[in-house]
Amino acid sequence: TVHPDGDEGIRQTDSDAALARLSAVQKSYISDPFVRYLLPRGAHLQPPRPPLINVGTYVRSEGIDQLVNGWLELSAKEGRQCQIVSLGAGSDTRFWRIAAGPRAGTLAKYIEVDFAENTTKKAMAIRKSKDLSALLGKAEDVKLESGGTSLHSPRYHLLAADLRLSPNESLAPIMTKSLPGSDPLLSSDLPTLLIFECVLVYMSPEASESLIQWFVDYFSTSSSGVLGGLVYEMFGLHDSFGKVMLNNLKARNVLLPGVEPYPDLASLPERFTRHGFTTSYAFTLRDLRRVCISKSELERISRLEMLDEIEELELVLQHYAITWGVRLNNPEAHDLWKG
Ligand code: SAM
């Protein structure tokens, strides 16, 4: 089901996410030298986000970074390279941050998918920026395809699809497309992490389920199959604070009628367990801030801007969660990945 009022609002949520990231970079919460290339000119002149939003962006970004880095480290420990697929990637810069970082050698492939309008813009921005292009490899190995809606390079691939459609129509043709040398774009024998950062809320539960199940089926034939999943989303919007957040989403016309975020933290791991994932946990950003951010980092960010309302911050952060899952085809062979 496609949104009855069109998808412009949904596609626009990407600019919001990227502007929030830029604001957190400008205020020194996080470091990301790449995000500015993916925003329209003049974006840096926009007023920064309020401190509470900047802290939220920081915790989200740190939490996801820690999990993704852990994934890259586990692959390296097993002596394997890995693959990351980001669905609804928007203007995310994660590929470039990994490619410029110490774990670059562990990454065999990074595939991003979004609506064609967004991938076209991103492909053009990549072409225009020397810093983004340089990390893709030699210019002659970087190609725009499908009328400029997709971009291929040796490691990084940007693809257009509407993820609400049946995966056999939307994903299968682009993911199983052959690369030179006749390997399919999506390798079924690499440990693979699926990232759904702030995207599943814009589709029906049935569409999200078929999407995840499509990947499970794709990897199920591989004896070395290790499939990881990470979902970042809002949830539990039934209390009074949550209702304000829900109404805000509804006012922006981005929720499909009848589609509501998951009711509570305990229900979130079902995102993965219903598909036979061996391990699945969900953490709220509130807990991540308390447990996963070091004391010295908390002190550093507390000096960046005045934030009086810690209670309000916690109230917001407890409505966002990261859910993590791992599915092992052969648990005996992959002890390392169980935790
Ligand atoms: N993942 C990025 C991040 O967290 O910074 C972007 C998040 S943004 C809030 C949501 C993204 O998901 C947008 O780029 C939007 O176009 C994309 N998206 C939503 N529904 C989609 C669909 N049905 N098919 C493809 N992309 C979709």
Image (cartoon, helix red, strand yellow):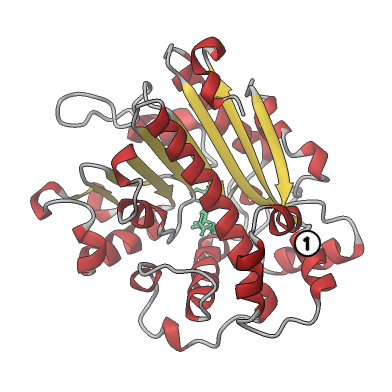
Q: Is residue 172 left or right of residue 271?
A: left
**Other-residue count near label 1 (Cα within 10 Å), few / some / many at <14 / 14–19 / ≥20:** many
Which residue appears at 67% of the width and 77% of the height? 302
**179, 132: nearer the viewer:** 132
Q: What amino acid is found at the position of numbered circle 1 in the picture?
A: Leu
Which residue appears at 51% of the width and 61% of the height? 11
The answer to whether residue 329 is visible is yes
Which residue appears at 33% of the width and 38% of the height? 106
Element on which disc 1 rests: helix
**Total label count?**
1
**Residue 159 in picture, x, y percent from top left:** 35, 46
Vertical order, 82 against 53 (above or below): above
Q: Which residue is mark 1?
A: 246
Which residue appears at 34% of the width and 35% of the height? 174
Quarter of the image with the C terminus is top right
Task: Place residue 157 in its image quadrant.
Answer: top left
**Residue 10 in picture, x, y percent from top left:** 56, 60
**331, 273: nearer the viewer:** 331
Quarter of the image with the N terminus is top right
**68, 50: nearer the viewer:** 68
